[in-house]
Image (cartoon, rainbow, N blue to C red):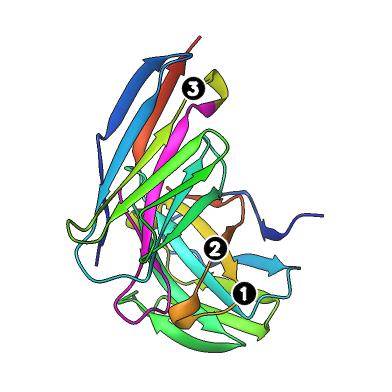
């Protein structure tokens, strides 16, 4: 069953602007991950945040996690055209045997 | 060196045919997965194998049969293909399963079109 839901479904911005994507999930988790998928390609892992962490940074990426609200956000700062892709959040399934993915946010960054 | 490789990348076939997709990982991971991505980009887990043993079978029709000859390979065989099987199938692997399942490494996908 689907666990994460991303919001918005689509986001269109200009280069240099920041992009924020949100993810809500339903059950208790021990970690939450974000992935990027370029058109026609496989998913690539971006960042993992554990349930005892509130914020994590990686380059231009900033992820927050609020376990009380069961939500996470991904912020991409100073976006570039190359950031154009779909972004998915993923959480462990109830048996912790795999990851369940949300429907994704499609980000378009225009030059 | 491609970490997770799957073949073929594209597959076009007629309804009723049988086809296979192969997947290999050279990362030394214990766990491998098959995911199906539909036209709306929704990713759904199909199967998971840990060290050649099936651990997840998510209500997939039994026309789909995974086979893991060793922990580096997880193939997907599909019998009697139907129009609704058209999708992109992704193979993935992770170091381990369970509560410490970390990052998944994905292949580039196999786009199956059933006519």
- As displayed, is residue A39 above or below residue B101? above
The reply to whether label 3 and label 1 mark residues of one chain is no
Q: Is residue B13 visible?
A: no
Q: Is residue B55 visible?
A: yes
Q: Quadrant of residue A49?
A: bottom left
Front label number (3 vs 1): 3
Compute the Cα span from label 3 to label 1.
Answer: 31 Å
Report the chain holding disc 2: B
- As displayed, is residue B105 above or below residue B60? above
Within 10 Å of disc 3 (Cα), the crowding (few <14, some 14-19, many 20+) is many
Return the residue at label 1.
Answer: B95
Q: Quadrant of residue A8?
A: top left
Callout 2: helix, strand or loop? Answer: loop
Return the residue at label 3.
Answer: A79
The residue lying furthest to the top in this view is A111
Disc on the earlier residue, 1 or 2:
1
Q: Quadrant of residue A50?
A: bottom left
Compute the Cα span from label 2 to label 3.
Answer: 24 Å
Residue range (magenta): A83-103
Labelled pair 1, 2 in contact (Cβ < 8 Å): yes
Compute the Cα span from label 1 to label 2.
Answer: 8 Å
Q: Residue at x 56, y 63 (%)?
A: B91
Return the residue at label 2.
Answer: B103
List x then y, in percent, for residue B7: 67, 57
Residue A52 numbered mark, or none: none
List x then y, in percent, for residue A106: 37, 32
């Amino acid at each position: 069953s689907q666990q994460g839901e991303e919001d918005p479904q689509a986001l269109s911005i200009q280069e240099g602007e920041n992009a924020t994507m949100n993810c809500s999930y339903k059950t208790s988790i021990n970690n939450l991950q974000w992935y990027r998928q370029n058109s026609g390609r496989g998913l690539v892992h971006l960042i993992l945040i554990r349930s005892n962490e509130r914020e994590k940074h990686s380059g231009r990426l900033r992820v927050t996690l609020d376990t009380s609200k069961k939500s996470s956000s991904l912020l991409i700062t100073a976006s570039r055209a190359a950031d154009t892709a779909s972004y998915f959040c993923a959480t462990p399934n109830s048996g912790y045997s795999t990851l369940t993915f949300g429907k994704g946010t499609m980000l378009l960054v225009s030059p | 060196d491609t970490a997770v490789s799957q073949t073929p990348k594209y597959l076009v076939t007629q309804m009723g045919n049988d086809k296979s997709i192969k997947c290999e990982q050279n990362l030394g991971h214990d766990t491998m997965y098959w995911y199906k991505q539909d036209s709306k980009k929704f990713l759904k887990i199909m199967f998971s194998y840990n060290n050649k043993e099936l651990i997840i079978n998510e209500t997939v029709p039994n026309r789909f049969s995974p086979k893991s000859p060793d922990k580096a390979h997880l193939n997907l065989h599909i019998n009697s293909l139907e129009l609704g099987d058209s999708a992109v199938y992704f193979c993935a692997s992770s170091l381990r399963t369970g509560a410490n399942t970390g990052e998944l490494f994905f292949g580039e996908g196999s786009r199956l079109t059933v006519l």
